[in-house]
Image: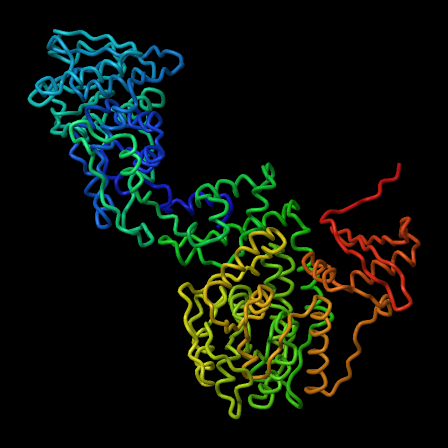
Amino acid sequence: MELSQLATYVGTCAHDAPAPCSGACPFGLDVRAFLKKAGKGRVSSAYRDLRTALVFPSIAAELCPRPCTGACLREKAGGAMAMGLLEQAVIRLSGDPQPDVFQIPEKDAGIAVVGAGPAGLALALHMARKKYRVTVFEKSDAWGGSLRAHPKYSGFQQDISRQLSVETIDFRYGHVVTDLSELSGFRGVYVATGEGGADFGLLSGWDSQSCRTARQGVFCGGGICGMPLMESMAAGAKISVTMETLLQTGRMPEKSGKSRCFPEKLTLPPVEPAQSVAPADPETGYTKAELKQEAGRCLQCNCGVCMKDCGMLAKYGKAPEQIAMELMADSGPHFLSSRTMTRQTYSCNLCGNCKDRCPEGIDLGTMFQMSRTARVAEGIQPEALHDFWLRELDSVSGECALALLPPGQSSCRYVFFPGCQLPASLPEQTIQAGRLLTETFRAGVVLGCCGVGAWWAGDQKRWEANSQWLRQTWSDMGRPVFVLACATCELMLSRLVPEIQTVSLYRLLGQVENLTNRASFPAAAIFDPCAARDNDGFREDVRKLAQRFGYTPQELPEQGHCCGWGGHMRTANPALYQSLAERQAGKSDLPYLVYCANCREVFLEQGKECRHILEILLGTCDRVYYLHEKHENRLRVKEAFMKELQNQPFTPPVHLWDGITLLIDRQVQQEMEANLIDNDTVKECIWCARAQGSGFVDQNGVNLACLKRSVMTYWVEYTETPEGYRIQSAYCHRMRFEEVQT
């Protein structure tokens, strides 16, 4: 799929399609919008909606059989909406509003309407609004047709007069059309002679969908065709569109893909019953207060399940169709990028929850990822949002990488692949897990990354290069099964290197004897990472292992939601990240049992008691490591495996600034972490400033050092002490500063 195809891809989305009530309405009235306005007391605006859709609102309000009531999803929770009473109240409370005047040029084409009943009048009004020259031929001496016998005709007549008052229509009363040939001077003809009227032989070739006949430019509708009253009036709008399109292009208009909405596609949350409101005075009808109360019962039926279930979509309030159009406009040689769209594109955590929830399986995450990839290819991506993570990927796949076979073997059946975050966050547990796999299954070890950071960033070259390294390593080791501790690694390998067979670490650990419970919970709730949502095997392996050690974790009401880590949302939208993390942490009062290192870190930072399942088996770790410590942990894990598997020495990388000692208060360190500034960067910044003489010193003796790295510029404020460099502040600008010679 290409970005240019996104509009077609989301074409089956039910969001913003007509609600069931609108789908049942002959006029296609947007009932949601009408009732929303009425519920807020915006009577005049609600009336305009009625007038636009119903043509003659008083007639429809009085005579419509209300098919919308039968389709109303409120029926089982307090009774269907009282649409007739609501419409009548809006008409009455709006006063005597005059129709809108459309200032558009008059057209030369003449339109003939035969019959001045409700069907003919509806078409005449629509074509007159489009400024065609409309002539109505009526055999009697007045308009109204079948309505003239109705007891409330006087009120209907007032409504008709009001709507026609601002348009120019030539009414020719007492004129009986005997042959359509006398109307040859008109470009379009509509025959609406009413039940039992002259049909001029048109019915044999009549199309019930378009109301076209076999004669060019001639339409037929209303009672003469057996159409009920409301359908006769509603047909006026539809026929006017078809007629105008034929006049201007010679072709039929294309059908709308969302003319109807199917109730089965709607996913509505449980609602409390709310009884329908009866007017205190049935003769008068609703007061404004009663109108608002009854209209307020509307459920505003809409799918929107993706928006209800996703913090990002709920924040931006955009439906899939709008997102698709914006993403298409946001890329390509003439991209129309904006800060808002950029922020939204990178605020998606790409968790796939929307796809699973959507009745049509629409995956907005894939759309956003495609946009990110296109942005990178076109050189318009916000590099700073992913700079830290991509540099970390380069480190994991570079100086921290490792591929070792078991001692004395040229190939192996299993290889332990812990990913990038587990060695950083739980180094001891990673080492012990690898040791168990080596002892029990003669497994090798591969340290590296699945490439998810590059995938989230849309950096295709990086993820392809990383995938090639994994593919080659796997082949060189005899094509073993990769043993994975991380569901994200499982997902990415299946997506980027599908030829590699995988198995969860927790399935193999379930076969290891003599394991003991090393950390106890009185009770716990299990939090499944978003990457495991569709991975039944991974989830079951974790649960079986937990049960083996005496746990029956409580299931959360909603599973498979992202903790907030995914997609690098943290840098693109910190506030949204924080709200999402708090929301997920608050789903249960119980401690969480997790099997994702990132989930563990997010929840611990929120003050949520949390344990990784490996902590139950292999010992606990009661802290979240700082960024520089995570790097050291990865190197320590590499060193341990080199020694245990091959008895090889390990020489860590050496930098010129390694000898610098930093003195950092806890608050400053936390601020650095929030801005993704690690201690090594601070050391390098100070060293470069001192080596190059490029720093500044203010009047208080505080030094200011600057370091430019890729698209980032880092600043460090510090003072020198005998013990080391005391850091006052460290911050960064996510932009590139360049010196220009003049």
Q: Quadrant of residue 159?
A: top left
Left or right: where 550 falls relative to 709:
left
Instruction: Please provide percent x and percent y for residue 724.
Output: 87, 66
Q: Do we see residue 115 in this rendering?
A: no
Instruction: Please provide percent x and percent y for residue 516.
Output: 53, 89
Position above or below: 360 against 419: above
Residue drawn at x 77%, y 80% is: 650
Left or right: where 199 falls relative to 445:
left
Left or right: where 514 falls relative to 381:
left
Q: Do we see residue 85 in this rendering?
A: yes
Residue drawn at x 74%, y 49% is: 733
Q: Quadrant of residue 62?
A: top left
Position above or below: 351 against 505: above
Q: How many marks?
A: 0
Residue drawn at x 13%, y 20% is: 152
Left or right: where 564 falls relative to 47:
right
Residue drawn at x 34%, y 41% is: 17
Position above or below: 679 against 175: below
User: Which of the pair 161/335 is nearer the observer?
Assistant: 161
Position above or below: 154 against 48: above
Classify the position of the C terminus by image quarter.
Answer: top right
Furthest residue in direction front, as rendered? 280
Instruction: Please provide percent x and percent y for residue 593.
Output: 50, 74
Instruction: Please provide percent x and percent y for residue 15.
Output: 37, 45
User: Which of the pair 642/598 is nearer the observer?
Assistant: 598
Furthest residue in direction bottom, as rendered? 514
